[in-house]
Image (cartoon, grey):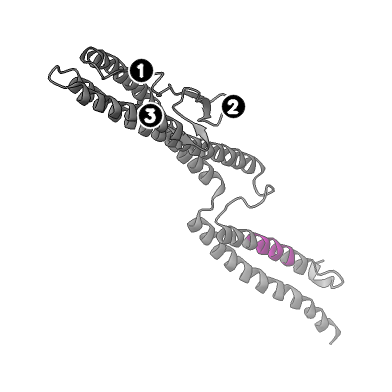
Amino acid sequence: MSDLMRIYTNVQAMQSMNSLSVINQKIGMHQLRLATGKRINSASEDPAGYQLSKSLETRRRGLEAALQNVSQAKNVMNVAEGGYQNIMDILQTIKEKATQASDYSLSATQRASIDDQVSALITEIDDIVSETTFNGDSLIDGGYSGAFHTGEGATDELTITLGNGDSSALSINAVDMTTANGASAAITTTSAAIDTLAGRIQEVGQYKVRLATKERTLSVAVTNAEATRSVIEDADFAKEQMEVLKLQILQQTAVSSLAQANSAPQVVLSLFK
């Protein structure tokens, strides 16, 4: 006997109702994806995809933090190089003054005046050293050494050590321009100081090259990690909208089917006429 004759339980209506419920749930899921822009909004939608996407997000955020660290390290190097370059300019001036004072045509008074100028310049070198700081840390006094975290791993570090740039470390704190012989000796001393300081500036340049390389590498890694996460987690709007349109049509047919299933048992009434 047909289920149509059993009116106590309308099986056809129940089947249509179940189908409509499933369609409504799917429509809600796709509309949520369109609203959030994410294909995975809950772990239940794709457990493996959810775990992988969060792992990639964690990696990306770690790489971005490392990228900020590299940028900070570059700022430190720029400040240190600026201090060294200012000292280099003063050393060049001191050598110029020493060359001038070594000439025998100058009087003792003139050499004494030059010596006073050089003493003031040497004092300025030490002032530059004490004033070249970053976040309260002196950079070029010989005591700066630290490891910058430049990657997502626990051991991805770059250790940076900066040399001393004060007059004592450069051995120019005792130059004497009051005599021609002293000025001649100061030329040699200053030349050696210039070479020493140039080596320290070169080291800063090498650090900056390494940091620039790490910055490029991290930027590419961040982009790749985010691109991979996007493929897994982000919604394809064209696909989601297509699914919604399809389900909306099915929703309408399911509602029509439910209405017909609800009215079908009325046929039984004709048996009582």
Residue 111, percent from left and from top: 22, 23
Residue 96 at least partly seen: no
Q: Residue pushed farthest left? A: 105
Asked whether 81 or 6 is in front, the reply is 81
Q: Nearer the viewer, residue 17 or 38?
A: 38
Camera-side residue of 205 and 135 = 135
Viewer-nearest of discs 3 and 2:
3
Q: Tell me the SS state at disc 2.
A: loop
- Name the residue beneath numbered marker 1: 174
Is 209 situated left or right of 145 in this image?
left
Q: Determine whether 40 is above or below 103 in the image.
A: below
Residue behind mark 3 = 123
Query: What's the residue at 82%, 82% (across, down)?
Result: 269
Which of the two discs, 3 and 2, labels the residue nearer the N terminus?
Answer: 3
Q: How many marks?
A: 3
Q: How far apart are marks 3 and 2 (CA)?
A: 43 Å
**Residue type, numbered disc 3:** Thr
The answer to whether 220 is drawn above or below residue 28 in the figure is above
What SS does tag 1 mark?
loop
Q: Position of residue 60 (x, y in %)?
A: 53, 39
Residue at point 25%, 24% (across, down): 112
Indicate the quadrant containing the C terminus: top left, top right, bottom left or bottom right. Answer: bottom right
Mark 1 and mark 3 lie on one chain; the one further toward the N terminus is 3
| Mark 2, other Cα within 10 Å: few <14 / some 14–19 / many ≥20 | few
Q: Is mark 3 on a helix, strand or loop?
A: helix
Identified by mark 2, the residue type is Ala
Q: Residues within 10 Å of mark 1 (few under 14, many from 20)?
A: few
From the image, give the main secondary structure of the stretch colored magenta. helix
Q: Is residue 59 above or below residue 173?
A: below
Give the quadrant of the N terminus: bottom right
Asked if residue 273 is positioned above or below residue 180 in the image, the reply reads below
At horizontal 29% and vertical 15% (from top left) the residue drawn is 189
